[in-house]
Amino acid sequence: MALSRAPALLLTFAILALLQLWVFELGHLDHIFYAHDYVLGPYVGFSAVSIRTFMLSFFVAFSIYAAGTARARILFCLDVCLRYIALCLILDMGSIALFAYTGSPFPLLAIQVMAGFAGFAVFAFVIIRRGAMPSPVPVVRGHQPNTRTFWRLGLTGAVATIVSTWAALTPNPLFDELRRITLLGGIGPGIILLLLVWFAQLYVIAIFERNRHLRRDFRPPISIIVPAHNEEYVIGQTIQYIDRAAAYYGQPVEVIVIDNGSQDATAEIARATIQTCRAIQGAVLHVGTPGKAHALNEGVMRASYDFIVRIDADTHVREDNLALAMQNFADPSVGAVGGVPLPPGGGIFDPGRRVEVIVKHGFYSPALSAASGLVGIPGMFVVYRAEAVRSVGQFASGMNGEDTDFSLRIAELGYRTLVDQRIGYVSEVPTSFAHLREQRLRWFRSVYHVSARAHSLISSSNFSVRGKLVLPYMLLNTSRRAMMMPLVAFGVLELLITSASVALPHWQAIVAVLIGSPMLAAALAILANNRPRALLSLPAYVLFRALRSWYTLESALSIPIMSTSTRIQIGRDPWPQSPPPNPRPEEAA
């Protein structure tokens, strides 16, 4: 994808937004839209940003520069804009009806917040509907612990609500100071603390549950598969690290390196290194069909043991990684276990990446596992129960995020999937902007690809925490991240053009959402993972998040838009549900 498309989009967006803000500022539309945004009906208060003007400007600018034919992009623009306008009209009609019934106007801030979420949702929905996506494949579902999950979510949610409400309503010098420096922002501490307290409770439950079920002496034989394509520079070291971990593990370890059409000496170096190892038995296979999924599927077929470890060719496992991971499989309901992919250190992006993985994989992933909501486990290092792997079938080819798709399907079979934050392995981090961009474009497309391939979880009437809560949230969050840089530009334009007589953007709230809230969550995750030195990387994390947002926008632009659309019916499952081929064992007491 051309590097110029995202900057061109941002410039076009700024021109479109500036023209609309200027028209509103002249006052010619005050008799219809006196909020200086496309809002109908009475309201009270003000909003942080003219979100509807922002959304429509972004949708049009995105449609101009998206990948696809002119006809496809025009249809995309009409689809996303008309759907968004319809949702905003529903919001406004509801507000007008409420005012007619109660006589009290609805807060403009609440109306605009709902309009913002509607914009994120519509954008993600239309991308999946009109973008080139993997073909949907039914997700086979087994028994889900819904009763336990409802109780956990309900009780922890109630506690979080009480704490956040108390914080929002009770004068407190600490909260006042945090608001002043925009860590909690003008929106008050309630919303931000609600999520932090909620996830903190789930994190504690996850740690307790893990410690309750693990057995430190559980060490069955394992098979390790290592897909490799042109990895001669690192494959020897990777195998040596595996050999050390196998020696520490002390039980039979089989290593299968799958040479996926390498054009270098990957296979030769792998064979030579295996011959020098003492704790592993290994072989090198050749798979000519390009694509990591094909290599993984061949490795799974050749694996001899009941537990299969997937390790990327540029991942260096630590000595205790295998032993720590296998402790969790003493519980027969566990189907997959991952860890935290730490950066090697010394690279330009390593400080920001360090905080990112601690937050995502060391904090949020364990918390989500406690609520049966964990979707993805990083494929750099993950251990599978072989019967779960073979029940799912094969890794999907032709998509980004085959590891996330696979762990999602294992979890929906009824197996527990979890990330054990004690497992810290070293995974390569790009050292150039070009490499980071290429990596992140693939990673961020994977949210759309996984959601499209498993969209029956989202659209069916059968409840699943992953399908009804987590996947929709991931889509909303990806849309929000793609719009972050345009949103910052829009806020600056609105601040410059809006007169003092009109409420200016509430900058404390904006900074709290963009910077303050993520920093509080990152600090909590760092301390929970007992990695206090990572606090020094928080400034780098701010810059890394901004760069990540830019690449998310580019990733969305890289998705080819089609002239035809996929019919997605909410509330209807296009495939009948069937029991899993191998129902998981009952959960250990």
Image: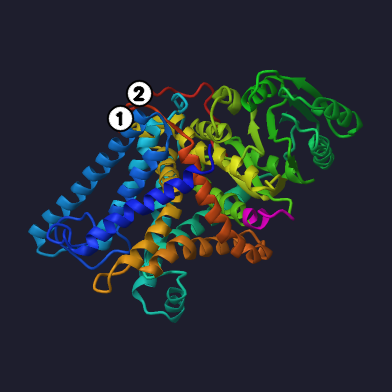
Please indicate whether residue 116 sits to the left or right of residue 195 in the image: left
Tag count: 2
- Label 1: which secondary element: loop
Residue drawn at (60%, 48%), measured in percent from left and top? 210
Cα–Cα span, label 2 and label 1: 9 Å
* Residue designated by label 1: 569
From the image, tell me which residue sits under label 2.
Answer: 574
Are the residues at dot 2 and dot 1 in contact (C-beta closer than 8 Å)? yes
The mark lying in front, picked from 2 and 1, is 1
Q: Where is residue 395 in the image (x, y as percent from the top left)?
A: 58, 26
Q: In this view, does 512 lie above or below 461?
A: below
Q: Mark 2: which secondary structure?
A: loop
- Magenta part of the protein: which range? 346-354
Q: Which of 197/79 is in front?
A: 79
The answer to whether residue 558 is left or right of residue 487 is right
Question: Going by the image, does 25 lie left or right of 372?
Answer: left
